[in-house]
Amino acid sequence: MNYRFSIQYTFLFVLLSAFLLTLHSCKDHSCTDGEQNQFETGIDCGGPCPECGLEPDPDPDPDPDPDPMDDGCMAAMCAKIDDVAWSAAAPTVVESPDALSITGMSSTGSFITLIHNGPFVVGSYSLVDPSVGSFSVDTLIYSSTYGTNNANITFTTFDTINRVVSGTFFFDAALQDSTNLRNITDGSFTELSY
């Protein structure tokens, strides 16, 4: 083997090794990846992870007083649309002299809007005209106005001093001139500012 050929192979080996090392170092390491890495002293234990030999706490943060609205959704506004989970991370609340409008947009671009035309106090209220619940997807707007009148919003918190609302909702909605219902159930909104 000549000297030039040897240099080329050495250079190629170093380049390939650097590439593989970079590729491996870009991998997300965690304490649950099933590998001993990131200075762990065992597989997924020691170093930055919990000590080896310790059993993880099955419920590290038990909630002694669970929220009755908490069904596992961690977003500020949640519901089920025809039994499919829906959530909005940052819903908006707009107050007008006679109404409160709550609108949430999911990560897929669908909307739920609740318009409450009633007293600004804790309680349960119908979401039927003049109040309304709607679900919008693409260009279609399903409204409780065209549903079965099975529509309700309950305010568990209506703080007009700190301007915060929390509560639950459900409604059946349809397109105008349609009998095809969308069922919005298990709705909740938590500590929304207005």
Image: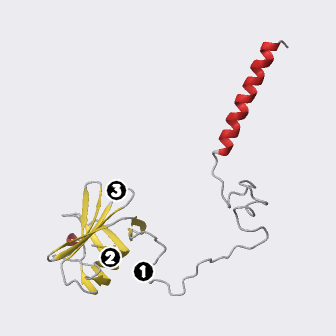
User: Where's residue 97, x and y in %?
Assistant: 14, 76
- Of the two numbered discs 1 and 2 in the rendering, the one whose residue sits closer to the viewer: 1
Residue located beneath label 3 in the image: 109
Find numbered disc 2 in the image and state the secondary structure of the residue it sits on.
strand
Do callouts 1 and 2 mark residues in contact (Cβ within 8 Å)?
no
- Camera-side residue of 81 and 74: 74
Colour theme:
secondary structure
The numbered mark at residue 121 is none
Q: Amino acid at mark 1?
A: Met
Q: Residue at x 25, y 75 (%)?
A: 148
Q: Quadrant of residue 10?
A: top right
Q: Is residue 50 left or right of residue 3?
A: left
Q: Is residue 67 left or right of residue 57?
A: left
Q: Amino acid at mark 2?
A: Phe
Do callouts 3 and 2 mark residues in contact (Cβ within 8 Å)?
no
- Of the two numbered discs 3 and 2 in the rendering, the one whose residue sits closer to the viewer: 3
Question: Marks 3/2: CA distance?
Answer: 20 Å
Find numbered disc 1 in the image and state the secondary structure of the residue it sits on.
loop
User: Where's residue 176, x and y in %?
Assistant: 19, 64
Q: Residue at x 64, y 47 (%)?
A: 27
The numbered mark at residue 69 is 1
Circle nearer the N terminus (3, 2): 3
Circle nearer the N terminus (1, 2): 1
